Amino acid sequence: MFFDKPIIIIISNISTMLPFIFGTAFLWHVKQRKSFFPIWGFFTFDAAMEVVFLIYSLQGKPNAWIIHFYTPLEYSILAYILSTWQEKKQISNFIKISIPVYLISYTLLKIYEIEIFDAETINYISRPLTMIIISILSLYTIHQVWSKYEGELFKNSIFWFLVSILIYYTGSIIVEAFFYLKNRDVLWHLLYSRNTLNILRNILFTAGIIVAYIYKSNPEEEIAAV
């Protein structure tokens, strides 16, 4: 049952719903919504995947295989979002081009069995590599935001979103890379670490939405303009 899980995992499951709920409420109350749709799409995707994971978990079925499908979709959505937050069009186009390149590379990785698809093991090669790429792109983007909005960073929703992405994906690189281990004690520690990072990520995402509502509530302004 759901409430038989460790409390940290329960809190993590619930926290994933917060950005989706607050983001949906934000869209409902703010008329100008166009620039917020990509990040809201990610919140929706994440919440939906959390439900799928939970269903399989409650039924006692292996759910690690879902990560193999989650990872390329996750990269595609986040890369597109990051591309929309770039000041330079060349950088934005470069990030967009990286999406099909990534998807082709990911497919080849599976076809040539460099990374084996397994129902009980996550993609411990491609996932850490994906997190490294997202971390680099996020670090570059947050540098641009920092330079432009220095002194008003906490009033900028994009800053909060980027900090959330950067902390989660940078912190998860090592955690995800060692999920192939069979030592149960080590796996539990890794699981606790990942869920802690997930909770922090979702709190920061939610904070970004609240900041967007407080400081960008003018319908004439773009919600996520950088």
Image: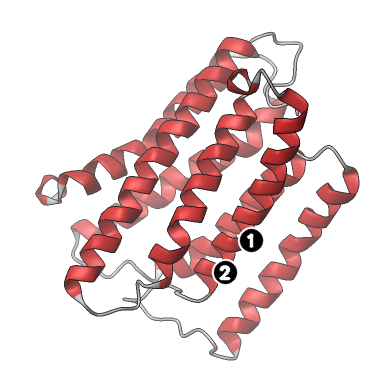
Give the structural element (helix, strand or loop) at label 2: helix
On the question of residue 16 being in view, the answer is no
Q: Hey, which quadrant is residue 8 in on the image?
A: top left
Q: Residue 203, how many percent across, how many down? A: 41, 32
Q: Is residue 70 left or right of residue 217?
A: left
The amino acid pointed to by label 2 is: Leu
Determine contact: label 1, label 2, CB under 8 Å: yes
Q: Residue 110, how many percent across, how many down? A: 56, 83
Pick whichever, 95 or 220, lies toward us. 95
Look at the picture and state if 116 lies above or below 17: below
Q: Which residue is pictured at 56% across the width and 11% down the height?
A: 214
Look at the picture and state if 139 lies above or below 129: above
Mark-to-mark CA distance, 1 and 2? 6 Å
Q: Is residue 156 left or right of residue 6?
A: right
Q: Which residue is pictured at 42% across the width and 43% down the height?
A: 47
Q: Is residue 24 left or right of residue 87?
A: left
* Identity of the residue furthest to the bottom in this view: 112
The residue that disc 1 covers is 133
Q: Hey, which quadrant is residue 134 in on the image?
A: bottom right
Colour convention: secondary structure
Pick whichever, 132 or 43, lies toward us. 132
The residue that disc 2 covers is 129
On the question of residue 41 being in view, the answer is yes
The amino acid pointed to by label 1 is: Ile
Pick whichever, 198 or 68, lies toward us. 198
Q: Residue 88, how many percent across, how many down? A: 87, 42
Q: Which residue is pictured at 50% across the width and 19% down the height?
A: 210
In what quadrant of the picture does the C terminus appear? top right
Query: Count of labels shown?
Result: 2
Pick whichever, 89 or 120, lies toward us. 89
Look at the picture and state if 86 lies above or below 127: above
Q: Residue 39, how many percent across, how many down? A: 60, 37
